Image (cartoon, rainbow, N blue to C red):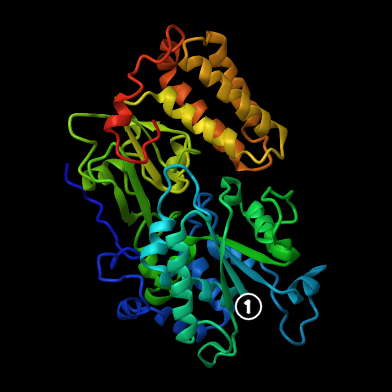
Amino acid sequence: MTAHTPLTPVLSRFWDDPEPWSLQTYLRHGGYQALQRAMAMSPDDVITTVKDAGLRGRGGAGFPTGTKWSFIPQVRSPGSDQKAPGQQDAAAKPHYLVINADESEPGTCKDIPLMLTTPHFLIEGAIIAAYAIRAHHAFIYVRGEVVPVLRRLQEAVAEAYTAGHLGTDIHGSGFDLELIVHAGAGAYICGEETALLDSLEGRRGQPRLRPPFPAVAGLYACPTVVNNVESIASVPPILLHGVDWFRSMGSDKSPGFTLYSLSGHVTNPGQYEAPLGITLRELLDYAGGVRAGHELKFWTPGGSSTPLLTDEHLDVPLDYEGMAGAGSMLGTKALQIFDETTCVVRAVRRWTQFYAHESCGKCTPCREGTFWLAQIYQRLEEGAGTEADLDKLLDISDAILGKSFCALGDGAASPIISSLKYFRAEYETHLDGGCPFDPYASMLSAPEGVGV
């Protein structure tokens, strides 16, 4: 099949250049021109531009980025006496921008390559976003294990300071910004924005009760915007090329370009930057298809926390509405491809063990539920399971889904519910004698990163 939706390399367009991470390379490709345009606009006009572009959060939830920025209480214009209760106090507090770079979702690998290869996209976007929300301190919270990314970001931030893009009175605008790269301690739960804020403040990373939301009381109880790396990195191209250019890609409700990460049993795994709404069939065509001699069995549209899909969903648009219509979520666009050699029960068991390990333990449904789910999966794989265990998997998943303190519980339940929906017969074959698949066949032939 010939792909008919063209790829749209924007953030990845000069990844193959020599030293694409350097400031010199970034400037050669139009770097920091968007910042100059933003500085010539008012902060409110920058927010309006991002709103009009329709940029949606690329961290998984898909919430409109410009709308999130507009939630930050703004300083009232001189002479204005109209204000909502508490607005003046909230606006007087410092504003903070926090960039969530704690990429920990199994199968997700878009933010780390982006920061490693073209970190100045993120830095320029952070300056523009901070200017728009009137923040003078910004933080990039990076997963602590990825030391090369931390070093690359720190070097790029130092370059930006030297060039006058960061610091005091940036380019004579009167705007000051300090940007800090912070290394997290390696907890999946810190990908949840309020747990990240607690961690950034030096406490144990656990989700906060909301309301209040971060826009009102976030970092240090001050108004805070928390955005994903790709969301912020997408801002400079919008400012540079315009709203109409951005909306010319993707769909009406999900406009623009995004990074799709293909991994697993695919001929050419990697990053494919394409318009929102492209299908997996088209992306697989670009990637050389499922590995030779095999066929697609199931796949995840947005990492392990999204309900898995099958080959019947190959032509569903990979945008927020399309995935919702298919009973799943776009999530982080981590497309994990599994062929017929993979045991779906074992794959979901591995994910369940991950969520049981990473649960912070703050709420009972997630803490207890993930533990018992892992026990049931052990029985199934050892051939000691019963028909009642399959119903018990669904009962426990239902007790977790939508009833946990944060989305970790939902992420643990989603692959279980969806895999039983599409592959209950395979679960039933595990009731007598354990897993019918060779436990090592897929592992020996699978590319690195496939959860089998």
The answer, for residue 339, to whether it is visible in the render is no
Give the image quarter of residue 94: bottom right
Q: Residue at x 37, y 42 (%)?
A: 335
Give the image quarter of residue 450: top left
Q: Residue at x 28, y 68 (%)?
A: 14
Query: Which secondary structure, mark 1?
Result: loop
Residue farthest toward the right in the current orientation of the protein = 85
Q: Residue at x 57, y 51 (%)?
A: 191
Q: Is residue 77 above or below residue 10?
A: below
**Is residue 97 shown left or right of residue 156?**
right
Image quarter in which the C terminus is found: top left
Q: Amino acid at mark 1?
A: His
Residue farthest toward the bottom in the current orientation of the protein = 172
Say which of 88 and 397 sits in front. Answer: 397
**Is residue 222 shown left or right of residue 116?**
right
User: Where does residue 196 sit, x and y in percent of width and height?
Assistant: 63, 55
